[in-house]
Each structure stands twice: as structure tokens, then as C-alpha cells.
Image (cartoon, rainbow, N blue to C red):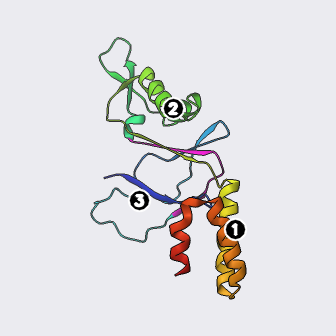
Amino acid sequence: MSIVFGLIDEVSGTMYFMNAEHPDIVLYRDGIAQFIENPNQYRKLGTQGQTGNICIEVFSLRPDDVIILGSDGRDDLILGKEPDSEYDIINQDEKLFLAHVKNADGDLEKIYENIANTGKLMDDLSLLRIHYKGVTADQKKLDDELKRLEDYKGVGKFDKYAELGEKVISDYPQLTNFLYEMSL
């Protein structure tokens, strides 16, 4: 089985991933679609005789980056028939998918429409879109305030801890349970 799997740290934008014979991950950034370099190639899961270590790739996402993943069906298209023949013309250009992503501005429905309008699907097609929005100013402010709360608690400045805690509770009421558990 081919697979791409990974993890994205929502705060830092760091993406950790591994690809085992799956089509490459596409990065859509600033109107440009490109493959994310994957120097370590692994055999499909379940391949016998596989030896060696596994390396996890690391990639830094920027705010508003879009990651597009797709099954083999994204490239497996019948583009038409050979002239004077019954043989199908099969897409051999994996960069065609990059054009679909760019022309669709990273929108999955439009990407699918572009693929379907280019040729006949030969294989199943699945697409996944991940939009990394980055850390908002509110998230950064909250993270800083929670860190200060921990610092106040750690050094025994409970008056500052209580004062900041009340402010955080009023600014972020959804955190009441979290802060209560932190104080236990």
C-alpha cells in the first residue's frame, strides 16, 4: 500500500512527513504549485525485504500555505486516442497536476473539475487539502499569557497569577476548565 503520512505543528507550521511510493505532496504558495522535495524514497507498506532506517522529512509551512495530496488517479488520465489507432493516449506528465492546482487556485472542487475536463479517469481519485493559516495574533497573545501564568505559578507570585488568570478567564471564557485543571 502506498501512503503519505505526517503531522503538522499548528503553532510553528512545521510539517513532519514520510512518503512510501505515493504521489508527491504539492505545496501551493503565493499562486505557485510545486512538489515538496522528498529525497528519501520508501517502498510501499508491506513490501517484503525492506531493510534500513526510516527518515522523517521536515518542511516549514508559512501562513496561508496550502498542501494538496492526491491518489494516483490524479495523474492516471486517458487524454484521447492515438491517431489511426485504438490505443489510448495516457498522461505521462506528473507536472500536469501542478497546472491543475495552480489553475484552480488550490480549490479542491476546481482541481477535480480541471482533471475531469482534461481526460477520462482510469483510476480512483481522492484529494485532500490542508490550509495552514498560521498563528493569529490572538493565539500568540493567549500563548504568551498562558506561559506567563506558568511562570508566575512556578516562582510563587500567586497575586500576579490570580490577576492574570482572571484577565485570561474574562478574555477567553472557553478556557475556564483548562485553567482550573492547571491550578490543581
**Position in image of residue 10 (x %, y %):** 57, 58
The answer to if 62 sits in the magenta stretch is yes
84 relative position to 115: left or right: left
Q: Which residues are magenta?
A: 57-71
Amino acid type for the residue under numbered disc 3: Tyr
What kind of element bears circle 2? Answer: helix
Q: Are the residues tagged 1 and 3 within 8 Å (C-beta)?
A: no
Q: Nearer the viewer, residue 175 or 43?
A: 175
Residue type beneath disc 2? Leu
Give the CA separation, mark 2 to mark 1. 44 Å
Rendering coords of residue 25 (x, y %): 50, 47
- Residue corresponding to mark 3: 42
Q: Residue at x 52, y 55 (%)?
A: 38
- Find the distance from the CA under tag 1 to the CA under tag 3: 40 Å
Q: Please tell me in which quadrant of the rendered image residue 163 appears.
A: bottom right
Kindly identify which residue carries mark 2: 96
Q: Is residue 17 visible?
A: no
Q: Are marks 3 and 2 in contact (CB under 8 Å)?
A: no
Q: Which residue is mark 1?
A: 144
